[in-house]
Amino acid sequence: MIDWLALAVALPLLGAVGAVMLPGRAPAIGLAGAVLTTSAALSVGLLVAQGTALRSDLGGWGAPLGIALAADGLSAALLVMANLVALCISVYALDYFGAGSRRHFWPLWLLLWAALNGLFLAADLFNLYVTLELLGISAAALGALTGRPEAVGANLRYLLVGLLGSMTYLLGVALLYAGLGTLDLKLAAAALTPGPLAWTVFALMVGGLLLKAALFPLHFWLPPAHAQAPAPVSAALSALVVKAAFYLVLRLWVDLFGAVTDGGAATLLGALGTGAVVWGSWRAFRAERLKLLAAYSTVAQVGYLFLFFPLLAEAPATQRQDLLGAVLLLALTHGFAKAGLFLSAGLLQKAAGHDRIADLGPSIQGLPAVALAIGLAGVALVGLPPSGTFIAKWVLLSSAIGSGQWWWAPGVVLGTLLASAYVFRVLANAFERGPRHGSLHDARGELAAAPVSIGRLAQAVPLLMTLIAVAVLGLEAEPLWDLLQDRSP
Amino acid sequence: MPAGRTPVLITQLIYGLGGLVLFLIGIWSFLVHEPLLRKLIALNVMGAGVFHVLIAVAYRGLETIPDPVPHALVLTGIVVAVSATALALTLGLRLGHGDD
Amino acid sequence: MIPDHLLPAAIVLTSLVPGLLIFALDEESHVLRTTLNLAGAVAKLALVGWLILGVYEGRTFESRLNLAPGLDLVLNADALSVLFVTLSTVLWLVTTVYAIGYLEHSPHRSRFFGFFSLCVSATVGLALAGNLLTFVIFYEALTLATYPLVAHRGTPDAIQGARVYLTYTLSGGALLLTGAAWLHALAGPVTFTQGGMLAGLEGQHDTQLVMIFFLLLAGLGVKAALVPLHGWLPQAMVAPAPVSALLHAVAVVKAGAFGIVRVVYDVYGVTLAESLGLLSVLAVLASVTIIYGSIRALSQDGLKKRLAYSTVSQVSYIALGASIVGPIATIGGVVHLVHQGIMKITLFFCAGNYAETLGVHRVSEMDGVGRRMPWTTLAFTVGALGMIGVPPVAGFVSKWYLGLGAADAGSDWVLLVLVTSSLLNAGYFFPILFRAWFKDPPASWPEEHVPAGRLETAAPLLWPPVVTALLALAAGLFAAAPVSPLEWAELIARREYGL
Amino acid sequence: MMAVRNLLIVAALAGIGVALAWVLWGILTGPAGDRLADLALARVPETGVSNPVTSVLLNFRAYDTLLELAVLLAAALGVWSTGKALPGFLPAGEVLRGLTATVVPLLVLSAGYMLWVGAHAPGGAFQAGALLGAAGVLLRLSGQPSAGLPALPWLRVGVGLGVLVFTLAALVLMAMGAGFLTFPLGIAKWLILVIETAATLAIGATLAAVYLAGEPLPASDAPCRQGGPRS
């Protein structure tokens, strides 16, 4: 009997331990762990796609005594996305880290991966706390890997804020256990009734998670932490770690709190989302460094995700599916696109020795594949067709207007325009041939003279990821909606 | 409420409300104090508060075996908190904040 | 052969696939790149020929891709889309030849031709779009594909022009998206339907429908360069000549105008649009644009700038045709979609030839250019006369039908607009023609790149304007022939009005 | 300004506190009853250990414990990734050395006892591991730069041991058809003891290792530092 759910968590753990114990072989062990973990996650995805929701009672005790792992369409889709993105990041990381940091990167990376898979598959509220902490600790450690004081400071702050969030979440879990006598998500959902307990637990758990999901105005820790981390880590933080916290909010909303809270909470989330879209996009537009721009863009993209809550709260059952599909599509597209953008930024940084947007011209023109990847990522971030984001925004706009909540539309439109502004600020570098940058041949010459050579594989990875975000998720997203069909085990 | 529960309830309330107070003091300290080390201590105070609440929930009187589940949660929570504290202290040390 | 339900997709793919392949090519693979370019263009032309035949016979062609529940990417061919597809396909072939000649020695050719092909793919896609969602998708894709072309030269001017272009078009795109999503929320999937898919909604949601119309119009008006949304067009003139040709005649401006036609006829329907009072607003906007563009063109010394303002003016004839109720005006507007394209591309090719051969960029430098480059100047003359509306060039036919239609609908003031505009057109084109033919050439040209030989300039630069000038003449002379643009426009009008 | 802000924070927290207290009052006086207590206690005999808390930690919720060991590992790796270990302290004086010589073996001994007793009374891997860690800290304070830990290659095995044994045991059980982390009753006691032993060693090694605040140096070139404990 193969328990794919458990394997998706156990394999990266084993890989991490292997990389700890044999530091000389860390990359090989790490890559093997990455491939095996991804296979397990894909198996979970395939099984769910074939029509069964998966649930595994670890230890055989069953809820409420034991802990279960579970996968339905929502978690399976995010699991598959996270694992594919993580696999891409792993391949890229082979080339990225030097001999000094390899032995540190790989085990922490696999632990982070285990935490992600554990989080997407968790069916127990306290277990979620443990996965959250594993995620937060490994993420902060990875983010500080360069050892530069700014990086260490930003990630220490990230760690502390994350702890504040998880402590708040944990108090919510404690009260929920006290009130309902269970920690299992499904059982708790069945037992929870509207009332002060439900609202308090909601405020504590979701409030803690919003801090981790970096929803405006709780986003302040994100840009420095994500911008200072090594590129593969930034990619994972922005594309996956923040997404995991959002997933949890959505999961709790759909399974637990949606039925016991009124529209006010959802409206608040939507309003904060709008703030995030506008403020994040604006700051991204003003950013002078590419990685900071990408980090602020994450703040904005998280905002879009939260705009779906007020619509979900009001939607009749028939439209819920559509909205869930759209928010899922948005999360997936952003996962691929943002990871691709950060990885591209890492290559430019290696080639140019910096990531100042204004001076990136020569390196961006010397690496056309990277320029293309940034362009495709930009298409997805702005929400231009064909990309998953475009479809998601279409659903968002038409549902907002259709349900009479038209006031969400201007924020979306404004965010889109600001996003185009910041994306094309970067892309203009790919065309510029001003006196400052010299001619194309100078640019190439400069690159050839530079000691850093950028491998073809490292260039191919972000291109592939952004292509998935644009072409696959933009044109072939229908199966996502099939995944979300109700499928009881 | 059965008469026998009153003393249990009082003990539970002392621990539980005490836990809440600790939790709030922790948040207050986290928000108000700039130094990262103090924020870290504040977080540990918050954690202690949550653990107190769990202990209060587990208590069922002196004659009855307490609920083992919250106790296990507290143990797990402590190890997690220690781990996070260790990492945070080291990061702070590298920043030069550790010598205060 | 290709099954009917794949033909529209195949037509898009014949430029998309070569475009993507070209990106991957080495800068120096001239032969392979040229082969790919031309093979794609010719294949597309062949497929379009087959499509025309099929549509004429009344067969339906529809490619459909499900994006999400209730959201379909639909490509299908009705008479209107066939008209636009044919125009873009023919002009793309010609422009490709021209661009190969024009750019053969400049850097970044793979990038240029890659985006060039993407640009045509997007245009053809929006021409074949079967619903508003598909239209929006290709409309935005067109913006993306043209940005690199406008920025191509990489000079500060080019970057600035591209930025202005992008600011306008993406803002327009956002409005279009909002309007389209709103309409989707109100009426469900917006399929383009002859006679108007909203026709049944009269009397309900009138205010919302009016607001949506103006959102859509603002979005489309940016690309169609309706005043006051035209600001990007003169700035985008910094692009290389083949790009200008593409922007003005084949793709961008045309996409906006085509979209307006689609929205008026196939989304709202003339009846609903009129009863909501939308058409008179459109008519006024179009007329203002026609006059304003012509006036601004008068004072431009830069040849391409003058042509750009001329485009601002001329494209609005199409919108004007759509704003007048009645089949005759419809014919005039729709046929002008084709005629303006052929004539304006001729003019831009010629402008490019002057610049590329002699370094002549300004009207004031054009003295005697007709003697040095007679064939080019002849083609230019045909285009210019057509723009003014002199028979028998194609432009006359459009204006004739527009005038008749306006008279028929009782909108006599439109005649005044047409006459004024024609006089202004003459005012900015005749001085050019006079200088070119009747003034003495200077002792030396500003920057003579191509020495006079057997041909006045390089062959790939010379043939395209000659061919398109001949097409413009033919479209006027043989307007009554079967499968002429006019005949086809009549077919469209008959189907729209259910005659 | 700051005062106003602080006042606002205090007021807001006071409000939140009142709400939380009200909810807690409602819960404790409400009908939630025994929660999972009776259910858990009733099934303790099926877990292979008789201490209820250990039953929960190592059997009912063993998966939590596995991940918790992973958290500890992540913290250790995070600490190591920040740089080399800080220099050790000068060798301690007579008194402290004597104390250390007495207390450290006692700590190790008590750790063993804690580990064993955890099966049926309060105790277990975490308490035992904490004692081992304390022994390490004490050694470090008294001038052992390595805190009594083995050389780095073995230390790496040590900190990973808990997760390794736990995960392998779970996977072997899965492969045998019992299910991930499902301990058959007959061998549950021994399996749990093995896992707990590995966990104890890992926890002890990790706690002592993080106290070095960095990746340990090879034993030969570990410098000593002037002065006592960091002041």
Image: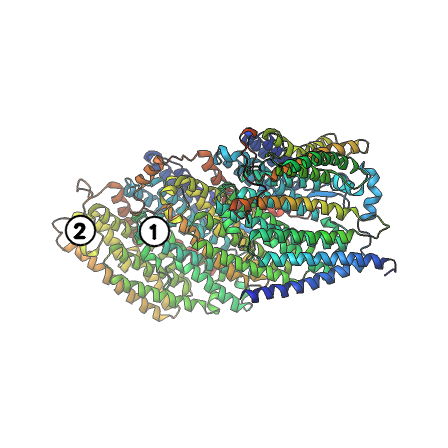
* Residue A75 makes an appearance in the image: no
Q: Determine if residue C133 is in view.
A: yes
Disc 2: CA contacts within 10 A as few (<14), some (14-19) or many (>=20): many
**Rendered location of residue A483, percent (x, y):** 63, 45
Q: How many marks?
A: 2
Indicate the position of residue A301 as horizontal and vertical percent values.
53, 52
Residue at mark 1 to residue at mark 2: CA–CA distance = 31 Å
Q: Earlier in the sequence, mark 1 or mark 2?
A: 1
* Front of the two marks 1 and 2: 1
Query: Which of the pair B59/A246 is nearer the observer?
Result: B59
- Quadrant of the rendered structure where residue C281 is? bottom left
Residue at position x 18%, y 57% in the image: C434
Residue B36, image x and y in percent?
A: 56, 52
Taking the image as shown, residue C244 lies to the left or right of residue A384, namely: left
Helix, strand or loop at mark 1: helix
Q: Is residue D182 left or right of residue C360?
A: right
What numbered label is drawn on residue C369?
2
Which three-letter amino acid code belongs to the residue tagged 1? Ile
Dot 2: element: helix
Q: Which chain is home to disc 1?
A: C
Crowdedness near tag 1: few (<14), some (14–19) or many (≥20) residues, C-alpha within 10 Å: many
Which chain's residue wears label 2?
Answer: C
Depth check, front residue: D189 or C2: D189
| Residue type of the residue flagged with mark 2 | Val
Quadrant of image for the C terminus of chain A: top right
Going by the image, does A478 lie left or right of C141? right
In the foreground, C262 or C221: C221
Q: Quadrant of residue C450?
A: top left
Circles 1, 2 touching at the beta carbon (< 8 Å): no
Say the numbered circle drawn on residue D194.
none
Q: What mark, if any, has residue C159 been given in the picture? A: 1
